Amino acid sequence: QVQLVESGGGLVQTGGSLRVSCTASGGTFRTYAMGWFRQAPGKEREFVSSINWSGGRTYYAEFAKDRFTISRDNAKKTVNLQMNSLKPEDTAVYYCAAKGDVPPESFQIGTADYWGQGTQVTVSS
């Protein structure tokens, strides 16, 4: 069983940057691919980015390319999402997710083995 706890959300102005982090406990972190999803009010949860177990492969939703960067530290059992050039439409609850050793692209279908509770990111205009 893996527990995931997100942190780092908050309020930022348009064009600003924010980094959200996810810390895992339980399980063997390095055996899991990790992903980030988000859900805005009134909208369905959507895929943001994912990374394979080693950090050598990453995958991004189109809207996240060139603005967001995912990374992981297996020693610290953390996965981070650096978000730059933020826009009001990036406002959402951001969720961390873990999945068995799968290609990062597999997160696109929206499923995962474990989910965090989410952290709020609000971008003011």
Image (tube, helix red, strand yellow):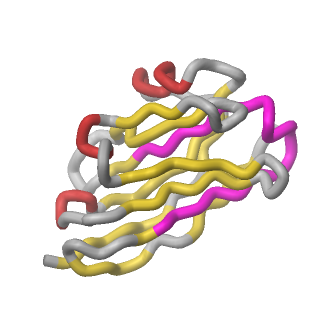
Q: Is residue 116 above or below residue 122?
A: above
Residue at (71% x, 34% y) in the render: 54
Please, which residue is most extreme toward the left here?
Answer: 125
Residue 45 percent across, percent down from the top left: 35, 41
Residue 22 lies in the magenta stretch? yes
As drawn, is 38 to the left or to the right of 70? left
- Secondary structure that dominates the magenta span: strand
**Which quarter of the rendering shows the N terminus?**
top right
Name the spot of residue 35 as percent of width and height, x first: 54, 39
Q: Residue 53, located in which quarter of the rendered image?
A: top right
- Answer left or right for 19 relative to 80: left
- For the point 59% across and 61% down, the residue is 21
Residue 122 in which image quadrant: bottom left
The quadrant of the image that shows the C terminus is bottom left
Residue 32 x %, y %? 72, 32
Please determine whether, in this image, residue 114 is positioned above or below residue 40.
above
Residue at 27 percent across and 63 percent down: it is 91
Does the magenta run of residues contain 32? Answer: yes
112 to the left or right of 84: right
Task: Name the one closer to the observer, 100 or 14.
Answer: 14
Residue occupying the point 62% across, 32% down = 56
Q: Is residue 18 left or right of residue 85?
A: right
- Where does the magenta region start and end? 19-37
Q: How many marks?
A: 0
Relative vertical location of residue 69 with respect to residue 104 in this rendering, above or below: below
Q: Residue 16: x and y, percent?
A: 29, 75
Q: In the picture shown, does residue 2 fall above or below 99?
A: below
